[in-house]
Image (cartoon, helix red, strand yellow):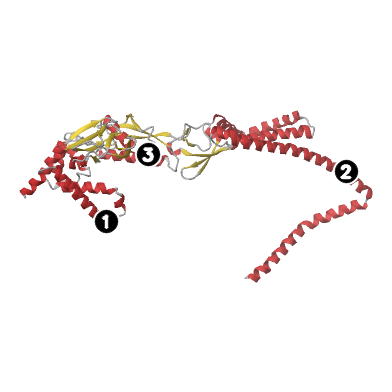
């Protein structure tokens, strides 16, 4: 194989050389004939030499002067681009200068240089040059009116600066499906280039943008406001709808770029044929750190749907019902015993209790309404009750020893409980619980639990196991433990909690043992 390759290379080289000779031999022969004829005539040779020298000197002079003008224009243009456009102006506006502005300035500089060459180097009248250029421009203007419209629209964009390179914008079409959202890559003579969320490049003529609505998400800064609409049944009171939707939106703060300030809010937007419309408004930094508007909206909607489900509410939908009796309640009502029992059954701590036990707690627990900002419990205080959150959002905070300030360590959403260790063991409150929104919570006291345990002491084992599982769920030690180790740790912690419960509820378990 090596020998064949080494032989093929000289053959290819010979063929290439032969092709070059065939292309050059005719012009070479013609040149030799005329050169020989000139050399044979001595007077013609002298005249040709003097004329050639004279013309060469003139051409060289023109070349040098033209070179001076063009090189000066090139240097001036590059100097302005480096120090003015890419330097001072780019720093002042905080964004790169569009190529269109640079190109227009470059044309003006070289047009000035060409004018100098015509007037000074060749000594021609500049007026005639510009008059001829004007006529040509009129003709070209009619032929290229769309192109010219693109150029002047691009100029207007760069002067008014409604958007700049790097901004995320939405170009509104005739319907929401035709909207185009993307990041501006370039603004040139004729077009605007956008990079969309799906990594596509969209090229739009500048004149098209002049007749369309454009939303600049980064026009007032990297944080923009977005909204999404929910529709709830007319049977849901507006104060309850606002409370649940607001809690769901605020529970999503800190996720997917949704900022905490300004915090999300909810307003009643109106009504339609199926219910009341609520507009959930939130602020985020779209398309930063790879976070898109769609991802942020997904987190908002998911959290709100979770809160609605926990509150026993479903979004409104078109329906037609025919009732031959009293119309049933479409949504869970915390004032109804059966609905309170159902809400209680959704709580992790009590979901394993019998229906009779749930009905007892539902009948005796107290519903309380707390305004936004109120502290339901305070860290370190004594307590003998627990709470179940039904509606709203709570933050769990801890006091720091050094500064005394409260630091948020978690949040509590509907269906979750807190204060259970104080109720069951009498331990001091381990954290401060603050209402982020207006909240509805149900309080279960020691007296309620004492009566339940007196009737059903075996309930204590179920409750102690659930609490043990909850406390070990997020333990770093349990993250790498085997299933058997998790079971042993849960049983051990449940026994410790059970021992404290027996000590706290004095007499309840002793009576049970005597009876047995």
Q: Residues within 10 Å of mark 1 (few under 14, many from 20)?
A: few
Instruction: Give the camera-side residue of 106 and 499.
Output: 499
Mark 1 vs mark 2, CA separation in Å = 104 Å
Q: Which residue is mark 3?
A: 254
| Observer-nearest of 174 and 302 | 302
Position of residue 130 in the picture relative to residue 327 (left or right) = right
CA distance separating discs 3 and 1? 33 Å
Callout 2 environment at 10 Å: few (<14), some (14 to 19), or many (20+)? Answer: few
Which label was assigned to residue 433? none
Q: Which residue corresponds to mark 1?
A: 483
Going from the N terminus, do you reach mark 3 or mark 1 first?
A: 3
User: To which residue does mark 2 refer?
Assistant: 51
> SS at mark 3?
loop
x and y percent of residue 338 in the render?
17, 38
Foreground: disc 3 or disc 1: 1
192 displayed left or right of 125: left
Q: Position of residue 249 (x, y in %)?
A: 33, 36
Q: Tell me the mark number nearer the camera, choosing from 2 and 3.
A: 3
* Image quarter of residue 388: top left
Q: Position of residue 393 (x, y in %)?
A: 29, 36
Quarter residue 143 falls in: top right
Residue 63: % across, % down:
78, 40
Q: Is residue 100 visible?
A: no
**Mark closer to the observer (1, 2):** 1
User: In which quadrant is the N terminus drawn?
Assistant: bottom right
Tell me the element at label 2: helix
Comes first in the chain, label 2 or label 3 = 2
Horizontal placement of 452 versus 71: left or right?
left
């Amino acid at each position: 194989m090596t020998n064949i390759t080494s032989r093929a290379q000289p053959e290819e080289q010979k063929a290439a050389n032969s092709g070059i000779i065939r292309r050059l031999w005719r012009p070479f022969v013609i040149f030799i004939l005329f050169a020989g004829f000139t050399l044979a005539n001595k007077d013609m040779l002298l005249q040709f030499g003097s004329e050639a020298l004279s013309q060469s000197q003139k051409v060289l002079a023109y070349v040098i002067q033209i070179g001076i003008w063009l090189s000066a224009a090139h240097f001036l243009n590059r100097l302005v681009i480096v120090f003015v456009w890419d330097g001072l102006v780019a720093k002042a506006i905080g964004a790169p200068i569009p190529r269109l502005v640079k190109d227009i300035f470059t044309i003006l500089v070289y047009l000035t240089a060409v004018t100098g060459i015509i007037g000074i180097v060749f000594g021609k009248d500049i007026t005639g040059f510009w008059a001829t250029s004007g006529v040509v421009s009129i003709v070209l203007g009619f032929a290229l009116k769309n192109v010219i419209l693109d150029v002047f629209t691009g100029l207007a964009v760069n002067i008014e600066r409604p958007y700049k390179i790097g901004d995320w914008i939405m170009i509104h079409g005739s319907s929401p499906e035709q909207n185009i959202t993307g990041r501006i890559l370039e603004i040139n003579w004729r077009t605007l280039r956008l990079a969309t969320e799906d990594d596509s490049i969209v090229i739009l003529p500048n004149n098209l943008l002049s007749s369309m609505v454009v939303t600049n998400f980064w026009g007032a800064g990297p944080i923009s406001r977005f909204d999404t609409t929910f529709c709830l049944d007319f049977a849901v009171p507006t104060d309850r709808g606002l409370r649940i939707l607001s809690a769901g939106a605020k529970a999503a703060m800190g996720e997917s770029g949704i900022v905490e300030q300004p915090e999300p809010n909810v307003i009643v937007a109106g009504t339609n044929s199926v219910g009341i419309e609520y507009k959930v408004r939130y602020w985020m930094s779209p398309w930063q750190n790879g976070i898109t508007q769609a991802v942020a909206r997904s987190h908002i909607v998911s959290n709100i749907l979770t809160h609605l489900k926990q509150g026993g509410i479903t979004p409104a939908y078109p329906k037609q019902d025919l009732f031959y009796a009293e119309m049933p309640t479409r949504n869970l009502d915390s004032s109804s015993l059966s609905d309170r029992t159902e809400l209680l059954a959704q709580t992790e701590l009590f979901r394993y209790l019998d229906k009779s036990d749930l009905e007892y707690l539902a009948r005796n627990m107290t519903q309380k309404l707390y305004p936004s900002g109120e502290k339901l419990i305070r860290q370190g205080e004594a307590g003998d009750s627990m709470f179940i959150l039904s509606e709203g959002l709570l933050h769990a905070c801890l006091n720091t020893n050094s500064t005394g300030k409260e630091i948020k360590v978690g949040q509590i959403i509907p269906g979750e409980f807190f204060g259970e260790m104080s109720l069951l063991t009498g331990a001091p409150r381990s954290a401060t619980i603050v209402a982020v929104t207006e909240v509805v919570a149900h309080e279960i006291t020691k007296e309620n639990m004492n009566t339940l345990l007196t009737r059903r002491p075996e309930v204590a084992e179920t409750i102690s196991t659930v609490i043990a599982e909850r406390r070990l769920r997020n333990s770093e030690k349990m993250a790498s433990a085997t299933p058997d180790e998790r079971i042993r740790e849960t049983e051990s912690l449940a026994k410790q909690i059970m021992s404290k419960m027996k000590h706290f509820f004095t007499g309840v378990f002793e009576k049970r043992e005597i009876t047995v």
